[in-house]
Amino acid sequence: DARVTQTPRHKVTEMGQEVTMRCQPILGHNTVFWYRQTMMQGLELLAYFRNRAPLDDSGMPKDRFSAEMPDATLATLKIQPSEPRDSAVYFCASGLPPGPAYFGPGTRLTVL
Amino acid sequence: DAKTTQPTSMDCAEGRAANLPCNHSTISGNEYVYWYRQIHSQGPQYIIHGLKNNETNEMASLIITEDRKSSTLILPHATLRDTAVYYCIVRVDPKGGYQKVTFGTGTKLQVIP
């Protein structure tokens, strides 16, 4: 049963520290999404990639967030420097058109 | 992508059918209807999707009105494990590759013993 995996599952850090979240998409999927979920904003799309190329990152704060796909099996989302308002659950999802996107379990980030 | 409207919350008795409505009156001809659900703090889970014909899989049935302006997700025999937030989403023909998919606030379904 193929699944999207995300690491770490939980991260607690102090304000100003760099945070890196990793995602392994389902093998063969060519599209990867990053979402952020908070109680106030719900699920927000931050960025998505197709064939490792960024297609849209308009939802991402550019000054501190960056998303990359070093290879087809790894997507990363970095925050530098982190701030308390970045505390949220970050979800990665992958898909292969015309099929649906499948979500990972998320990384719960707490910035103190 | 077309905007969707869903009730904020619904209750359903365990063992009964849960019927979750979604309004998407501005849907375009090439937009599909997708349903996802999110159980507590887990990642959203894909349930079903369709264009204009009714669809059924092992999880649920999707009924789309003839004018495609609304749809209903049916969980035929709701269990306590179906308690979740259900999201209705519309997006363009996935054969052309994904476009931005945004989630609304969804319907919080509470299955009652």
Image (cartoon, coloured by chain):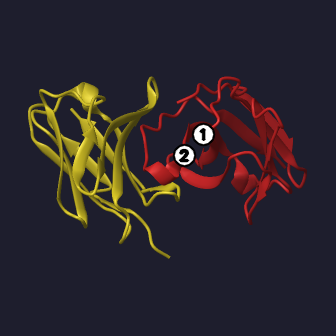
Chain colours: A yellow, B red
Q: Is residue A79 left or right of residue B63?
A: left
Residue B63: x and y in percent read 81, 45
The answer to whether any part of residue B99 appears in the image is: yes
Q: Residues within 10 Å of mark 2 (few under 14, many from 20)?
A: some
Q: Which mark is residue A6?
A: none
Question: Which residue carries the number 2 mark?
Answer: B93
Residue A46: x and y in percent read 32, 36
Q: Residues within 10 Å of mark 1 (few under 14, many from 20)?
A: few
Q: Which mark is residue B30?
A: 1
Q: Is residue B107 left or right of residue B45?
A: right
Q: Earlier in the sequence, mark 2 or mark 1?
A: 1
At label 1, the amino acid type is Asn
User: Considering the image in quadrants, where does the C terminus of chain A appear?
Assistant: top left
* Labels 2 and 1 touching (C-beta < 8 A): yes
Q: Is residue A35 left or right of residue B59?
A: left
At label 2, the amino acid type is Asp
Do callouts 2 and 1 point to residues on the same chain?
A: yes
Q: Secondary structure at mark 2?
A: loop
Q: CA distance from mark 2 to mark 1?
A: 5 Å
Q: Identify the residue at horizontal 10%, vertical 41% (top origin).
A: A18
- B107 lies above or below A23: above
Residue B7: x and y in percent read 73, 26
